[in-house]
Amino acid sequence: MNDAEENAAGQDALGVNAGPPGLDLDRLADHLRAAGLARGPLSAELITGGKSNLTYVVGDADTRFVVRRPPLGHVLATAHDMSREYRVMSALQDTPVPVPRTFHLCQDAEVIGAPFYVMEYVEGGQPPINPALAHQLVDVLAALHSIGPDGVGLGDFGRPEGFLERQVSRWKRQLDASRSREVEGIDDLFARLSKSVPRSGEPAIVHGDFKLGNTLVADDRIMAVLDWEMSTLGDPLTDLALFLLYGDFNQLDSENEGESPPADELAAHYAEASGRDISRLGWYIGLACFKLAVIAEGIHFRFTQGLTVGEGFAEVGEQVAPLVARGLEEV
């Protein structure tokens, strides 16, 4: 019996189906029936592996779809905004960037305890990286950055002016909100980033966490780009730097295990595909190190408070120090 079947069978004597953590299936079923998206009782399975928003495969007798909600417990300001993620995926439906179809957004936290949205279930997985797939990811990223925000209704999706300065200060605030221990060098990295901010080029739609692990792949083709919770309008080189950093730090993204081309090869591919100047890429990689270090520290904080769901959280805190060291090398 799989997790979804266990959830469906696990109703108590009163007929209450609690579902997996963070998802009240009875209340969700009532809400989705009213919205015309479900008919009978629901079963659900938590998709493990993510360290941020919670993702469930949900279905009734006829249909299968995906529900996304914020994590349980400690949530930092501006993070885990369901409406932003829903809006950007809806806007990109008919563009060269593959995304799941979106069906429903609920901002009423009373339904399941937090805002959530419903999207299409897309078949696919996350195979090990290979050179062809790595270059395909770069092409998808360049395609995303070529889309004019105004043309897809996202002209007001962010404030590109001062984007890099705000990124540096934002992640410092996030760090301060999650401090539970001393991290050597992390404040020095922040100071170096603050003193040497590059001048941004043409702004673009930025994914914010672009990597193989946030895609679905089938038959060596990228079927969908997922996890748009950090998307905005800003400097697209932040996406490129983060993607390259994930490739260098395989332990941060287990799906990156495999054979990937060198980072400079992928960076050159992006520069050719996008026409963008990448001469200050080192600074952007330093920012990516700072961002991932802060995110990892936040996850570590939630883990120490017993507020994480699923496996793989215990070692996340160990990733912070090497990220900070790499960032100090780059900036």
Image (spheres, rainbow, N blue to C red):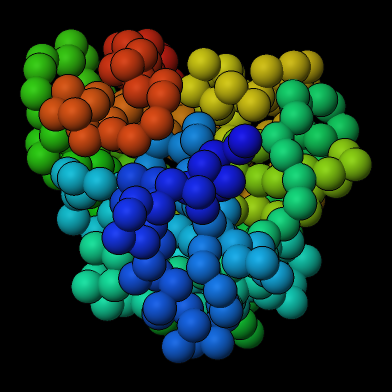
Residue 51 placement, left or right of 227: left
Residue at horizontal 35 percent and vertical 23 percent from the top = 313
Q: How many labels does the image show?
A: 0
The reply to whether residue 311 is in sight is yes
In the drawing, does residue 247 fall left or right of residue 328? right
Foreground residue, 257 or 275? Answer: 257
Whole-percent x, y for residue 223 in the image: 77, 53
85 vs 12, left or right, is right
Report the quarter where the N terminus lies.
top right
Vertical order, 111 against 169 (above or below): below
Viewer-proximal residue among 79 and 151: 79
Q: Residue at 81%, 25% (x, y): give it.
A: 130
Tell me where residue 294 appears, x and y as whole percent.
Answer: 27, 32
Residue 96: image x %, image y %? 77, 66
Q: Which residue is drawn at 40% across and 31% down?
A: 310
Does residue 198 lie above or below 51 as drawn? below
From the viewer's perspective, is residue 315 above or below residue 236? above
The residue sitting at the front extreme is 13
As rendered, which of 129 and 66 lies closer to the eye?
66
Would you say 146 lies left or right of 261 here?
left
Within the image, what quadrant is residue 288 found in? top left
Identify which residue is drawn at 57% across, 53% down.
57
Assign the C terminus to one quadrant of the image.
Answer: top left
Residue 164 seen by the camera: no
Residue 326 is drawn in which quadrant? top left
Picture coordinates of residue 49, whole percent (x, y): 50, 32
